[in-house]
Amino acid sequence: MEVFTIAPADTRALWLIGLIPLFVLVLVVSILWASLNGARSATFEVSPAGLRLRGDWYGRFIPADHLVRGMARRIDLVTASELTPGAGRWGLGSLVIKPAGSVFATANVRSCI
């Protein structure tokens, strides 16, 4: 009877398998950080040319001719409770991330954020 030794396995592939979950974790943490950072630093600028949203994932420019100027007014969310976002069908209770301009569930369905 002849006995043969088995060649040792190469462990480089195991490092690659270990790097995949690490890469996914770094990706998820980066997306979460960018989202939270954008929520804190989001701003808007009003000019005669239009409305510019900055600092979030959906930063964009809305031309003045696309804005409904007749309905624009300054509000205080403490006193105007009918305009606060709710947990309705399109409200903050939804698990879907909505870009700026999405309609939220309020008493006045036409109001947009």
Image: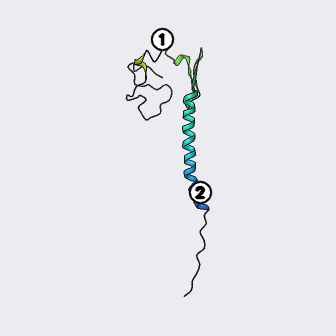
The residue that appears at 57% across and 83% down in the rendered structure is 3
Q: Considering only vertical position in the picture, is 15 above or below 72?
A: below
* Location of residue 7 with respect to 58 vertically, above or below: below
Q: Which of the labelled discs sits on residue 35, or is there none?
A: none
Quarter of the image that includes the N terminus:
bottom right
* Foreground tag (1 vs 2): 2
Query: Three-letter amino acid code at disc 2?
Result: Leu
Q: Hey, which quadrant is residue 14 in on the image?
A: bottom right
Q: Residue furthest top?
A: 70
Query: Could one spot residue 58 in this view of the protein?
Result: no
Read off the residue under disc 2: 16
Residue at (44%, 19%) from the top-left corner? 111
Q: Secondary structure at mark 2?
A: helix
Q: Looking at the picture, which amino acid does disc 1 mark?
A: Gly
Q: Quick check: 75 left or right of 54?
A: left
- Look at the picture and state if 103 lies above or below 73: below
The x and y percentages for residue 110 are 42, 19
Mark 1: secondary structure: helix
58 or 24, which lies in front?
24
Rendering coords of residue 97 (x, y %)? 47, 33
What is the image's colouring? rainbow
> Residue shown at 57%/56% (left/top)?
18
Q: Which residue is mark 1?
A: 70
> Which of the marked residues, 1 or 2, is nearer the chain's N terminus?
2
Answer whether residue 67 is visible to the viewer in this image: yes
Q: Nearer the viewer, residue 108 or 5?
A: 5
Image point (56%, 44%), residue name: 27
Mark pair 1, 2: CA separation: 59 Å
Residue 65 horizontal/vertical position (percent):
54, 16
Decide: few, some or many residues near mark 1? Use Cα within 10 Å; few <14, some 14-19, many ≥20.
Answer: few
For label 2, count other residues whose C-alpha is less than 10 Å away and answer few (under 14), some (14-19) or many (20+). few
Mark 1 in CB contact with mark 2 (< 8 angstroms): no
